[in-house]
Image (cartoon, helix red, strand yellow):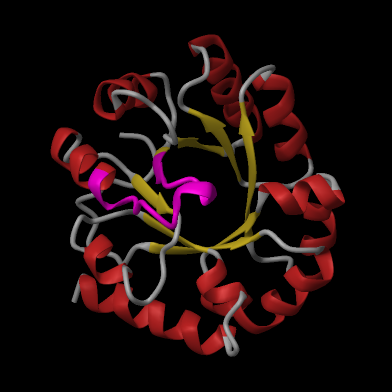
């Protein structure tokens, strides 16, 4: 199995998604970097700052694991290589893209010793596609409720379906996750829990992050 097996006994990994400006991202990281496992350079942040934002983050926080949320849809090997060459540890590709693109992202990850997270957003048959993606060498499947849909949807239904169909798959969960919803997610054994605004827009990001970590630890206690 690629990535981490869902039968793991350790707590899920906590990923903070940074989607604001560089200054906003750094202000949050100063408070939470020691409390999270993965720092996501969100798509809006990469659009604003370019992939070299990874170098800037590394200069200030040399030990963090970085994920570039590129949502790759074409030119998989070239685009993934750009992120890995900039020092990122993970890159995202869309599950609905063509197999050749996925294979290119996986090839780049192998060359750079990186990992591939597949964003399953809008994937019609998540279970069937998930089987194929893991067989192609992808490391994680990310159940993701799109930002524009978060008022009406949560990732929970898709997470349940994927966990039932792929009981040992390494799953990530993203989209509107926060303290009110995290417990219902944790019962389905995700490997990575992605939290954005619930941390970045909180009055006290460190306090919220600490409470999320405590919930994750308790879920495997």
Res 83 → quadrant: top right
Q: Residue at x 27, y 39 (%)?
A: 169
Residue in the image at 22% along x and 72% along y: 219
Q: Quadrant of residue 128?
A: top left
12 in relation to 157, above or below:
below
Magenta span contains residue 148: yes
- Asked whether residue 168 is in view, the answer is no
Q: Nearer the viewer, residue 160 or 154?
A: 154
84 vs 32, nearest the viewer: 32
Asked whether the viewer can see residue 126, the reply is yes
Residue 132 position, x and y percent, is 33, 18
The magenta stretch spans residue 1: no
Q: Is residue 17 left or right of residue 216?
A: right
- Tally of marks: 0
Q: In the visual, does 59 lie left or right of 219?
A: right
Q: Position of residue 118 (x, y in %)?
A: 47, 34
Question: Which one is in front, 142 or 138?
Answer: 142
Part of the protein shown in magenta = 141-157
Residue placed at 66% from the left, 66% from the top? 63
Looking at the rendered image, the quarter that the C terminus falls into is: bottom left
Q: Indicate the quadrant where residue 161 lies.
A: top left
Figure quadrant of the N terminus: top left
**Frontmost residue, 208 versus 221:** 208
Where is residue 14? Give x, y as percent.
45, 65
Determine the residue positioned at 57% across, 28% down. Answer: 110
Left or right of 153 in this view: 79: right
Above or below, 93 against 194 in this view is: above
Pick out the residue farthest to the front: 152
Q: Is residue 58 above or below residue 94?
A: below
């Amino acid at each position: 199995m690629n990535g981490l097996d869902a039968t793991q006994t350790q707590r899920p990994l906590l990923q903070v998604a940074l989607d604001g400006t560089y200054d906003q991202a750094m202000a949050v990281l100063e408070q939470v970097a020691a409390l999270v496992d993965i720092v996501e350079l969100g798509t809006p942040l990469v659009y604003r700052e370019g992939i070299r934002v990874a170098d800037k983050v590394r200069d200030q926080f040399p030990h963090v694991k970085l994920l570039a949320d590129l949502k790759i849809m074409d030119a998989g090997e070239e685009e993934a290589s750009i992120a890995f060459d900039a020092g990122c540890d993970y890159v995202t590709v869309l599950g609905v893209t063509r197999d050749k693109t996925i294979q290119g992202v996986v090839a780049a990850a192998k060359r750079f010793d990186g990992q591939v997270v597949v964003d399953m957003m809008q994937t019609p048959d998540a279970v069937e596609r998930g089987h194929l993606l893991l067989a192609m060498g992808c490391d994680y499947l990310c159940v993701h409720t799109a930002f524009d849909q978060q008022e009406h949807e949560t990732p929970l239904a898709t997470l349940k379906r994927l966990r039932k169909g792929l009981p040992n798959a390494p799953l990530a969960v993203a989209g509107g996750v926060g303290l009110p919803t995290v417990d219902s997610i944790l019962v389905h054994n995700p490997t990575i829990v992605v939290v954005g605004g619930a941390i970045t827009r909180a009055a006290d990001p460190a306090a919220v992050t600490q409470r999320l970590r405590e919930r994750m630890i308790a879920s495997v206690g």
